[in-house]
Every structure is written in C-alpha cells, then in structure tokens.
Image (spheres, helix red, strand yellow):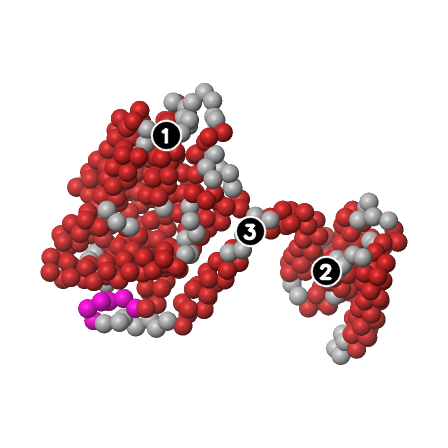
Amino acid sequence: MNTEFIKDIPPDLINFLLVVIFSLFIGLEQRRHYINEAVETVFGTDRTFTFIGILGFILYIISPHDLLPFIIGGAIIGGLLGIFYFQKIKVQQKFGMTSLATALITYTLAPLVYTQPKWMVLLIVVTVLILSEIKETLLNFSKKFDNTEFLTLGKFLVIAGVILPLLPTEPISATLNFSPYKFWLAIVVVSSISYVSYLLRKFVFPNTGILLTGILGGLYSSTATTVILARKSKENVSGNRIIAAIFLALTMMYLRIFILAAFFNMEVAIKLIPYFAVLILLSTLIAVYFSVIRKASVVTTNEIVAPESHTNPLEFKTAVLFGGLFILFAVVTSYVVGHYGAGGAKNLAFVVGVTDIDPFIINLFQGKWNLDAGIISMAVLNAITSNNVLKMFYALSLSNKSLRKEIFISFMILIVAGVVAVLI
C-alpha cells in the first residue's frame, strides 16, 4: 500500500523536494561556517542558497531540452557572484571564493537530480558539505608536505598510469619468460604497498610509537624496520616492546608477501595460506607476549620514532635496485630451474634470502618455470626463512646486549617453523 502511494507521487514533486532539501543543507552549512562573520560580508546562507537551488529548478524544468532559460539564469547568477567577489576584494581585501563556487554548485542541483542517479547527487552534496567544513584540517594537513611530496605523487602516477599501460606484454625472449609489462608491474605493485605505508607513516601517524612503527614498517620493509628498531633498543626504550615491534614487522611481511602472491598467482597464494597462517600466528603471539605479558610499566618519550626513519619508496635508486635485482633473479632462476629443476629452485631460494626477496618471489609468481604451485610455495618459504636468519643476525648485532637471548629464541621459533613447513 505504501509502495503504491509513493508511485503515485509525481516525479517532479520528488525532485523539487530533493533540490530544496539539498540546497537548504548547503545553506545551513554556510550559515554555520560563517556564523561569526558580519552579515554584510557574507554572500548568503540558508535562505539564499535554497532560493538559488529553487531558481535553478524552475529555469531547468521550463525548457529541459534546450536549457536556454537555465543557461541565461546561470549567466545572471554568475554575474552577480562576480560583482560580489569584486566588491569583496575591494572592500574587505579577502580573496576566498568557496561560498561563490558552492552557490554555483547549488544552482546546478536541478539538472543533476533529473539526469544523474540519486546516489551521485547525494555524493556531490555530501562532498560539498565535507569540503566546506574541513578547511582548517586541510590547511594543517598541507603543512606536513615538503617540497618533494607532489613530485613523488607525480612519479607514482606516471609509473602506474602512464608507463605501465604502454609497455609490451610479449616475453622478451624464449629463455627469459617475462615481459617488460610484467617487469614494470612488479615495480608498481611493490612500490604501491611501500608507498601506502610511507604515506601512513608520514601523514597519518607522524610520530608513531614503537609498536606502530613495527606494523607500518613491516609493510614497507621488514629488514629495514628490524635494523631501525634494533638500533633504537640502545636508547632508553623498553626492550620488550622493541622485540614486540620487530615481530609485528615480520607479521606484516607475511601479509605483504601474501598480497603479492594473491595479485600475481592466486594458486600459489592458496597453497601458502596454511603455512602463512601458522607463521603469522607465531609471530603475532611472540609480539603479544613481549608487548602485553612482559610489557614495560612505563612508556617513555624515547619510544617515539621519527618519520624520517624510512625513506621514500619511489626514490630513483630504490626503483633501479629493485629492477636490477628483478632482472638478475630472472636470469639466475631461469638457469637454475633449467639445469637443476625444482630442487635447484628451492635451494636458490635459501641463497636469495640474504638479499631483498621481493624481486625473487615476484619472479616465481609471474614466471612460467615449469614448476607447480607447491614447489613455488616451498621456494617462497625457503626464501622467507633465509631472510629471517639474516634479520636475526641484524637484530643480534645491532640491539642492546640484554635483549639478544630473547631475540635469538624468538627468531629461532619462526626459523624452525619455516623449516618444518617446508619439510612437511
């Protein structure tokens, strides 16, 4: 019954009410935003914006096909806004035109309601309301940018949105079975994960504590994070929280590698799920043990880690290093698999673990090495285990001497678990 009643309401009435409501909301926001301003310094608020929306509605429905009345009305509204803006500059010496742009958007609500999905109109209105309210927030946020941030963003957009689609997808040779597109895609994916971690680290959590440093750093580079945290342990910082943060970084490393596997080779990702579930559980339990059960009674200010601890992942030298390792591992993997088969691939993974493992495992995920998903997953586990051995030596050599026993035991739990997983 109620549904039929709604169907009987003329569409023009519904659209008119939507325009009035949306215009009123925008006007009320303008009144709240300028509530402390003198009345004569403001273009208009709730009633003015509502009238602008109604005017746009009237002029649109008069002739919705050629839009001539709507265009003429828009020109008049624009002229009046221009006069007001000129006087505002001349008398008040103020150059902001947010309210004027908002008034023009309000004027266009009628054609939006008629021609676009209602969710789109609502999204536009909500966006206008939010952007009008977060001026100070955006100003404070922009102060965090240095001179290179937009250049970095531009680099990312170029490598992901311009260069990648232009690269050929055919393999470069029968021996090296990867294409320029796959090579660049690997750089884009790894850089994307690291870049997100970098942005969170710098802008959302600029002065993070030890534990959050481990979480965000693990997405960026668990090896670099281990080095940073191990050095931090020599300051007046709770050693147990340092160990917890290192193993949180390892937890995020497993998640990062699983994301890469799911992106490039879902079959391998599925094979890795039970092994990674155990390894993630172990590293998380170790982190919880040192952060909760054996936590320090006092958290000192020395536990704050500066955002400069991690460099920008889109630096040219970082991309060159990754690209060089990717090509090197492609050549070496092709040779080893061709001559020694699956056993050679698994043994190679142990050797590769002492370097950056991302280029190697992405080669395994992308390449067609005549290896089944099980063998590739075992090679990945070998590389991770070997890399954990490297991180253990970094942590032992760089950390406070009082932590070395706990670090050694904790790392050995993960290393032994990785070896057992491969043997099983």
- What is the x, y in percent for residue 122? 67, 57
- Residue sitting at x 11%, y 60%: 339
Q: Which mark is residue 234?
A: 1
Q: Nearer the viewer, mark 2 or mark 3?
A: 3
Q: Nearer the viewer, residue 78 or 401?
A: 401
Q: Is residue 393 visible?
A: yes
Q: Main secondary structure of the magenta part?
A: loop
- What is the x, y in percent for residue 191? 40, 55
User: Dot 2, how many residues are within 10 Å of its Cα: few (below 14), some (14-19), or many (20+)?
Assistant: few
- Image quarter of residue 254: top left
- Image quarter of residue 121: bottom right
Element class at badge 3:
loop
Q: Earlier in the sequence, mark 2 or mark 1?
A: 2
Q: Nearer the viewer, residue 23 or 155?
A: 155
- Residue sitting at x 48%, y 34%: 304
Q: Earlier in the sequence, mark 3 or mark 1?
A: 3
How many marks the image carries: the answer is 3
Q: Which residue is mark 2?
A: 7
User: Dot 1, how many residues are within 10 Å of its Cα: few (below 14), some (14-19), or many (20+)?
Assistant: some
Report how far apart the C-alphas of labels 2 and 1 lie in the structure: 72 Å
Q: Which range is magenta? A: 174-179
Q: Amino acid at mark 2?
A: Lys
Q: Is residue 284 visible?
A: no
